[in-house]
Image (tube, rainbow, N blue to C red):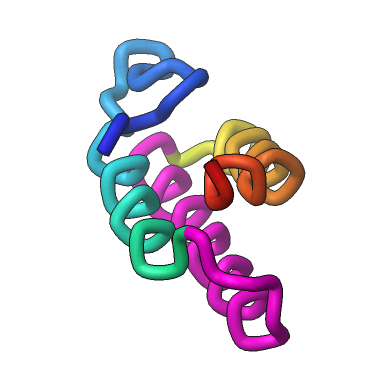
Amino acid sequence: MNSCSYSPDKIFGIDISSACELHDRGYKGIWGMEKTPWVIAKKRAIDTRLRDDIFKLTNSKFIANIYYFAVRLFGWSSLHG
């Protein structure tokens, strides 16, 4: 697991690495799988959980949504190598 990968593990002094590590574990369960409707739905659920967990830690929808949109846009590349 690589925590928050290319993004900061701390935002304004708040450690969000636990949310990122949980997200990494979720991705590990679907890593390398073909883009089936089930995998697409599972990835969306994993990404949504990351957003919700970051919101709980930071109390900022803005920050949570930045991370959410980043993984929605770029998460497939980390799932396939």
Residue 46 magenta-highlighted: yes
Residue at 38% in and 52% down: 23
Nearest to the observer: residue 67 or residue 71: 71
Decide if residue 15 is in sight here. yes
Q: Which image quadrant is residue 62 in?
A: top right
- Left or right: residue 13 versus residue 38 is left
Establish if 47 lies above or below 73. Answer: below
Query: For the N terminus, which image quadrant?
Result: top left
- Left or right: residue 19 versus residue 34 is left
Residue furthest out toward the bottom: 38
Nearest to the observer: residue 69 or residue 25: 25
Q: Position of residue 57 (x, y in %)?
A: 34, 41
Residue furthest out toward the right: 73
Q: Position of residue 44 (x, y in %)?
A: 62, 68
Establish if 60 lies above or below 72. Answer: above
Decide if residue 61 is in sight here. no
Residue at 65% in and 50% down: 76
Residue at 40% in and 29% down: 4
- Left or right: residue 17 versus residue 72 is left
Establish if 28 lies above or below 76. Answer: below
Specify start and end residues of the magenta stretch as a single range.
32-58
